Image (cartoon, helix red, strand yellow):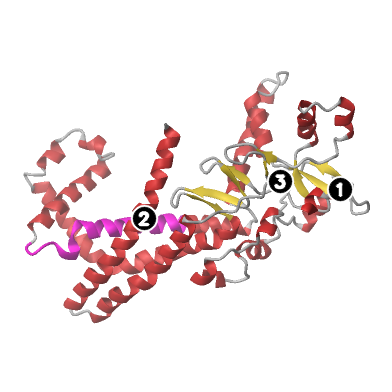
């Protein structure tokens, strides 16, 4: 039931956002602009007539790009370079591979002889049906498939974000705050005066007195702050009804549009900052979250052994350590073709951290900020081959070979 509700809410969010973009453009272009012109403010009038189309168009385009995105899915079988063991690749640990071979009916001697023979990980969840799962792929429980270079599943556009499309996502985040601020800033004084008048009217209006006297208003509105907001909304609605010739751009709908814009600006600013920091570290969002989960599991294991040193680790903690600890890797022998060994790198080993500059170039597809241009942000920043076989940092690769 909960999963159905989550899915349904995600399907409703994209139409809601697109409707907001449309009505914001319509109100700014055909109401606010002409109003400023009528008030003898030609610069603001011209700006509000032209700027909404210039600023909202790329945001809407980025959003639609991400909404209709067909994110990277790995092929069913791994490429020949991995089959021939010519490059490092993620695989099951020796114990995991041996367990699978035993279940498949292999003889014990064959299982032991094949311990250093790598077995790539395959996903049997959802729609994957045994498809190959590369190193930086993750299975999305919402979409039911694995995604190469998986960053996160975003409820705002009901789709997965993968590494090749991070530029479009980041461009959307960076375009939104200045757009909402530029389009709403001249309206702040007017709407603040209207909100103040609405509050004072609500405090003295007999028709709204029932709201203040109603005990449930504290709960329905979510506490004292929400209760005051509810009073302002009711007062604003009354003032709109009393306005001679209609409320104009002071109406409640415009106020709501501006408030939603401020909230979007704050959310996208925070997401933009965290995304920038994540890219510079060579991480994807899922890596950061998995690392946090791993450290929580490790602290739980440490606490268990401190309190109960003679008892085995509870299964759920052991499962979390295994789940969030990262995959094993097959490292080919540089001197003998076709030979190599399986290693389990520690999570602290930053396999994909090439330094801020190289990390940025790898994901964004360029050195500077040229990707912010709309026609460049809409494209893929990484080819599928690179996402499938994400390069490992040279020093980390050397350490893996020595393990």
- The residue tagged 1 is 402
**Where is residue 387 drawn, in percent x and y?**
66, 56
- Which quarter of the picture shows residue 107? top right
Magenta residues, dominant SS class = helix
**Where is residue 322 drawn, in percent x and y?**
69, 34
Query: Looking at the image, can residue 373 be seen?
Result: no
**22 on left or right of 231:** right
- The residue tagged 2 is 17
Please tell me whether residue 255 belongs to the stretch shown in magenta: yes
Which callout, 1 or 3, points at the residue further toward the start of the chain?
Answer: 3
Q: Residues within 10 Å of mark 3 (few under 14, many from 20)?
A: few
**Where is residue 99 drawn, in percent x and y?**
77, 29
Quadrant, the N terminus: top left
- The residue tagged 3 is 348
Q: Residues within 10 Å of mark 1 (few under 14, many from 20)?
A: few
- Kind of element beneath mark 3: loop
Residue at left 73%, top 18%? 310
Along the viewing direction, whichever of 197 and 129 lies nearer the viewer: 129
Foreground disc of the pair 2, 1: 2
Measure the C-alpha gap from mark 3 to mark 2.
39 Å
**Where is residue 63 drawn, in percent x and y?**
44, 59
Measure the C-alpha gap from mark 1 to mark 3.
16 Å
Measure the C-alpha gap from mark 2 to mark 1.
52 Å
What span is colored magenta in the figure? 244-270
Query: Looking at the image, can residue 312 be seen?
Result: yes
Which callout, 3 or 2, points at the residue further toward the start of the chain?
Answer: 2
Residue at left 63%, top 51%? 148
Along the viewing direction, whichever of 83 and 390 lies nearer the viewer: 83
- Which quarter of the picture shows residue 250? bottom left
- Kind of element beneath mark 1: helix
Along the viewing direction, whichever of 380 and 176 lies nearer the viewer: 380
């Amino acid at each position: 039931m909960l999963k159905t509700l989550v899915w349904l809410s995600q399907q409703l969010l994209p139409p809601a956002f697109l409707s907001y973009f449309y009505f914001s453009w319509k109100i700014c272009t055909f109401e606010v602009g002409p109003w400023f012109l009528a008030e003898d403010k030609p610069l603001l009038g011209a700006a509000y007539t032209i700027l909404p189309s210039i600023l909202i168009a790329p945001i809407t385009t980025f959003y639609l790009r991400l909404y209709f995105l067909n994110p990277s899915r790995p092929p069913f079988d791994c490429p020949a370079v991995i089959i021939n063991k010519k490059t490092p690749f993620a695989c099951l640990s020796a114990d995991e591979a041996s367990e699978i071979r035993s279940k498949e009916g292999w003889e014990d001697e064959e299982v032991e002889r094949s311990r250093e023979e790598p077995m790539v990980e395959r996903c049997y969840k959802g729609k994957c049906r045994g498809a190959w799962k590369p190193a930086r792929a993750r299975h999305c429980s919402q979409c039911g498939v694995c995604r190469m270079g998986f960053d996160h599943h975003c409820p705002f556009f009901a789709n997965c974000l993968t590494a090749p499309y991070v530029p479009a996502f980041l461009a959307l985040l960076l375009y939104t705050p200045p757009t909402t601020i530029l389009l709403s800033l001249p309206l702040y004084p007017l709407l603040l005066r209207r909100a103040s008048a609405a509050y004072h009217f609500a405090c003295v209006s007999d028709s709204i007195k029932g709201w203040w006297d109603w005990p449930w208003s504290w709960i329905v509105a979510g506490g004292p702050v929400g209760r005051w907001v509810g009073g302002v909304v009711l007062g604003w609605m009354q003032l709109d009804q009393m306005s001679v010739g209609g409320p104009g751009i002071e109406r409640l709908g415009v106020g709501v549009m501006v408030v939603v814009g401020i909230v979007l600006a704050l959310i996208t600013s925070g997401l933009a900052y965290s995304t920038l920091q994540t890219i510079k570290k060579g991480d994807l969002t899922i890596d950061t979250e998995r690392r946090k989960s791993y450290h929580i599991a490790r602290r739980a294991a440490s606490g268990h052994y401190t309190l109960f040193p003679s008892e085995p680790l509870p299964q759920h903690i052991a499962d979390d350590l295994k789940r969030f600890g990262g995959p094993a890797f097959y490292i080919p022998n540089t001197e003998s073709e076709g030979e190599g060994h399986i290693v389990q790198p520690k999570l602290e080993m930053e396999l994909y951290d090439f330094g801020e500059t190289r990390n940025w170039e790898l994901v964004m597809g360029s050195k500077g900020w040229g990707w912010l241009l709309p026609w460049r942000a809409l494209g893929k920043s990484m080819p599928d081959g690179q996402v499938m076989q994400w390069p490992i940092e040279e020093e980390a690769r050397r350490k893996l070979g020595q393990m």
